[in-house]
Image (tube, coloured by chain):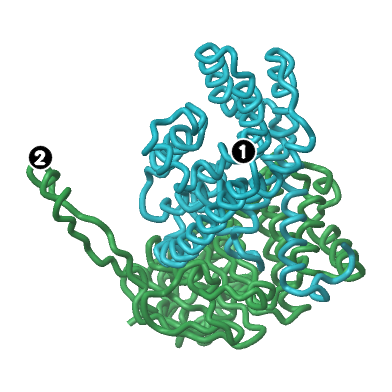
Chain colours: A green, B cyan
C-alpha cells in the first residue's frame, strides 16, 4: 500500500514551479505484509507509531483499497465492501467508537442498527439484554450519543458493533483513553465474546496489558513490514533471555543474592533478581535451600520491556 | 418494518433503507431547528430580493410575484448541502462509519438530504404564505399539481448536481468554493436573479438547455402558470432526465475513482 504525496522545495521559485510542474513521492505505508488468521484466533497486531497497523486494518476492513497484493477476509475482497461481507465484520476504533447521528439516543441507534443489519427481533432482544448486562448499558440507553463520555461511547460502540454478532472483529486501540476499570471491562468483554462466539479478533493496542491479557499470538509490524509472527511467550523468550525471580526474604544477605543473579530491585526485604532462563530452576532451588524465603515467584520480563526492545533492536 | 428486509427485492430494500435513514435524520436534525432556520433564511433571500426588484421594474405584471413565491417554495424544498453533509465527512474521516455499513454510502447522503428538505419545507412554507399574502399572490392547486413532475425531477437534479460537485472533495480541500461556483451558476441561469424570460435571447436559449433552469425556474414557471401548453413541459422534462443521467453517470465515475484515493484521515 503506497500513498502519493505531493512534494516541493521551499521558496518562491519552487512554489511557482510547482503550479505548472507538480511532483509527487510514493510513500509506502505497508509492504509485503503477509499473515493469515484462523477462525476463532485472537491476535495482537502491534508496532510502533506509523508502523502500518491501522493502515493494514483499514485494508482488511475494506476502508482502503490496497495498491498491490491480495487480501481475503471471510472469502471476500474487502475493498469491494459487499453487503454480505460488511454484515460479518466489525471495525471498532478507540479514536471514534461511534459514528453517525450523535443527536440520537443509544437505544434509537441500536434499533436502527437492528434494521440495517436485519437482525431478527427475538435475536435483537436477546442480544440487547446480554449486551446491556455485560457492558452495563442500562443507564446509557436513553442518553444521546453526543452526551456520552469516551468510556461510555466505547461501551456503546461495542454494543452497536456486536449487536449483529460479527464473525471478525478489528479492534484498533479499543482501550484508548479508558480508565483502569473501563479498560478491564473492555478486555474481559472481548475475551468472553471471542470465547462464546468463536469470533476472530485482530487487535492493535499500545497498551501491552491489552495484548498480554487477550492475545496468545502476536504479529509485530514495523516500517510496514512484519517483523515477527508467532506466540507471545516465544517472543518474550527470544528477546528476553532472562526471567525475574522475585523473593521475599527479610533476613537475606545481599552479597549472597548477588551471587545468584543480577539484583535489579530491593525494597523492604523483597528482592528482584534477573536470572538467565537456563539457570532459573537451579537458582530458585539454591535460594530456597540457602535462604529463609517467605515467598518466591518467577516472572517473565514485563511485556513493555520486551516489545520496546523489539521496536528498538528488531526481533532478529 | 419487522419483517426481514431480505424478503424484499433489492429496490424495495434500498427504499426501506432510505426511509429508515430519513426517519433517523429527521430526528437528528430536530435538535438543531435554529440552525435550519438560518438555512431557510439564506434560501429565501434570493427569491425575495428577485421578487422585490422585478416587481418594482414591472409593477403591472402580477405573474412575477407568483413566479417568485413558487420559486421560493421550490428553492427551500430542493436545497442541497452535500458539501457539508458529505464532503466534510471525507475531510474528517467520519465517512469511514458509512463505508462500513452494509448499504451504499449514498443512501445516508440521500436520507440526510431529504430530511433537511423536509425541515426547510416546514419552516419555509409560512414565509412563502406571508410573501404571497403581501404581494396578493394566489397559486392555484391545478398549476401546482401540474408542476409536480418537473418539481420531482428538478429536486433530483439539484441533489445530483451538488452531490457530483461535492465528490470533488476526494481531490481537493476547496469543495466549498467549487459548490459556491455551482450555486452562482444556479442563481444566474436557474431563474433566481431574473426569470429566464428576462434574460437576453442567446443566454436564454443556452440557459434553457443547461441543467440549472430545470432545477429551479422550470418548476416555478409551471407552478406559476407561466408555461403554456404541454410541449414546453415535455421538453423541460426531457432536458431534466438527460441531465440527471449525465450527472448520475458522472457521480458514479467520480465515486469509483475517488474512493480509491480515500486515505481515511484521522480514523
Q: Is residue B22 left or right of residue B109?
A: right
Specify the label residue B54 is tagged with.
Answer: none
Image coords of residue B139 (percent x, y): 74, 28
Which residue of the protein is positioned furthest toward the left in this rendering? A13
Residue at image coords 81%, 70%: B5
- Foreground mark, 1 or 2? 1
Image coords of residue A289 (percent x, y): 58, 81
Work out whether residue A302 can be spotted: no
Q: Is residue A150 left or right of residue A208?
A: right
Q: Which residue is mark 2?
A: A12
Work out whether residue B117 can be spotted: yes
Q: Which residue is mark 1?
A: B227
Q: Is residue B182 left or right of residue A114?
A: left
Residue at image coords 71%, 34%: B121
Q: Which class describes the residues within 10 Å of circle 2: few (<14), some (14-19), or many (20+)?
A: few
> Chain for mark 2?
A
- Please, what secondary structure does the residue beneath circle 1 have? loop
Image coords of residue A142 (percent x, y): 83, 44
**Are the residues flagged by discs 1 and 2 from a single subunit?**
no
Q: Is residue A151 left or right of residue B239?
A: right
Q: Which class describes the residues within 10 Å of circle 1: few (<14), some (14-19), or many (20+)?
A: some
Amino acid at each position: 500500500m503506497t500513498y502519493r504525496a505531493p512534494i516541493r522545495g521551499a521558496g518562491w521559485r519552487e512554489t511557482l514551479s510547482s503550479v505548472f510542474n507538480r511532483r509527487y513521492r510514493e510513500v509506502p505505508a505497508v509492504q509485503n505484509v503477509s499473515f493469515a488468521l484462523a477462525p476463532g484466533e485472537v491476535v495482537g497486531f502491534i508496532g510502533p507509531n506509523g508502523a502500518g497497523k491501522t493502515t493494514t486494518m483499514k485494508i482488511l476492513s475494506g476502508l482502503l483499497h490496497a495498491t498491490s497484493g491480495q487480501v481475503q477476509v471471510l472469502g471476500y475482497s474487502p475493498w469491494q465492501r459487499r453487503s454480505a461481507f460488511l454484515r460479518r465484520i466489525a471495525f471498532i476504533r478507540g479514536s471514534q467508537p461511534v459514528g453517525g447521528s450523535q443527536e440520537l439516543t443509544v437505544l434509537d441507534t441500536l434499533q436502527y442498527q437492528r434494521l440495517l443489519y436485519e437482525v431478527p427481533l427475538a435475536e435483537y432482544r436477546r442480544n440487547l439484554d446480554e449486551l446491556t448486562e455485560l457492558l452495563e448499558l442500562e443507564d446509557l440507553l436513553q442518553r444521546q450519543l453526543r452526551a456520552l463520555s469516551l468510556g461510555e461511547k466505547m461501551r456503546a460502540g461495542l454494543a452497536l458493533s456486536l449487536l449483529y454478532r460479527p464473525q471478525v472483529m478489528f479492534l484498533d486501540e479499543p482501550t484508548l483513553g479508558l480508565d483502569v476499570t473501563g479498560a478491564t471491562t473492555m478486555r474481559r468483554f472481548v475475551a468472553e465474546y471471542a470465547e462464546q462466539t468463536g469470533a476472530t479478533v485482530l487487535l492493535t493496542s499500545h497498551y501491552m496489558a491489552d495484548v498480554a491479557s487477550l492475545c496468545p499470538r502476536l504479529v509485530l509490524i514495523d516500517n510496514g513490514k512484519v517483523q515477527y509472527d508467532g506466540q507471545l511467550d516465544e517472543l518474550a523468550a527470544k528477546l528476553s533471555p532472562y526471567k525475574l525471580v522475585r523473593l521475599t526474604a527479610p533476613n537475606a544477605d545481599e552479597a549472597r543474592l548477588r551471587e545468584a543473579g543480577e539484583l535489579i530491585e530491593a525494597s523492604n526485604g523483597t528482592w528482584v533478581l534477573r536470572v538467565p532462563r537456563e539457570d532459573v530452576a537451579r537458582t530458585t532451588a539454591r535460594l530456597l535451600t540457602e535462604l529463609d524465603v517467605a515467598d518466591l515467584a518467577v516472572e517473565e520480563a514485563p511485556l513493555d520491556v520486551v516489545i520496546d526492545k523489539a521496536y528498538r533492536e528488531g526481533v532478529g | 418494518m419487522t419483517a426481514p428486509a431480505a424478503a424484499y427485492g433489492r429496490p424495495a430494500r434500498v427504499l426501506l433503507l432510505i426511509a429508515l435513514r430519513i426517519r433517523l435524520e429527521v430526528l437528528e436534525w430536530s435538535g438543531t431547528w435554529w440552525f435550519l432556520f438560518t438555512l431557510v433564511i439564506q434560501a429565501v433571500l434570493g427569491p425575495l430580493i428577485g421578487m422585490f426588484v422585478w416587481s418594482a421594474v414591472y409593477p403591472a405584471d402580477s405573474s412575477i410575484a407568483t413566479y417568485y413565491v413558487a420559486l421560493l417554495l421550490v428553492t427551500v424544498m430542493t436545497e442541497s448541502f452535500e458539501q457539508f453533509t458529505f464532503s466534510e465527512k471525507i475531510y474528517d474521516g467520519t465517512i469511514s462509519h458509512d463505508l462500513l455499513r452494509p448499504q451504499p454510502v449514498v443512501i445516508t447522503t440521500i436520507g440526510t438530504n431529504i430530511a433537511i428538505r423536509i425541515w426547510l419545507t416546514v419552516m419555509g412554507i409560512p414565509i412563502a404564505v406571508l410573501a404571497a399574502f403581501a404581494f396578493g399572490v394566489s397559486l392555484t392547486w391545478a398549476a401546482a399539481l401540474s408542476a409536480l413532475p418537473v418539481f420531482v425531477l428538478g429536486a433530483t437534479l439539484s441533489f445530483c448536481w451538488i452531490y457530483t460537485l461535492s465528490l470533488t472533495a476526494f481531490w481537493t480541500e476547496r469543495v466549498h468554493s467549487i459548490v459556491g461556483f455551482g450555486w452562482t451558476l444556479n442563481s444566474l441561469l436557474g431563474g433566481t436573479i431574473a426569470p429566464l424570460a428576462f434574460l437576453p435571447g442567446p443566454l436564454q436559449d443556452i440557459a434553457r438547455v443547461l441543467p440549472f433552469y430545470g432545477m429551479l425556474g422550470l418548476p416555478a414557471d409551471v407552478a406559476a402558470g407561466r408555461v403554456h401548453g404541454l410541449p414546453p413541459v415535455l421538453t423541460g422534462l426531457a432536458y431534466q432526465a438527460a441531465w440527471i443521467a449525465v450527472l448520475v453517470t458522472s457521480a458514479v465515475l467520480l465515486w469509483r475513482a475517488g474512493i480509491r484515493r480515500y486515505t481515511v484521515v484521522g480514523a
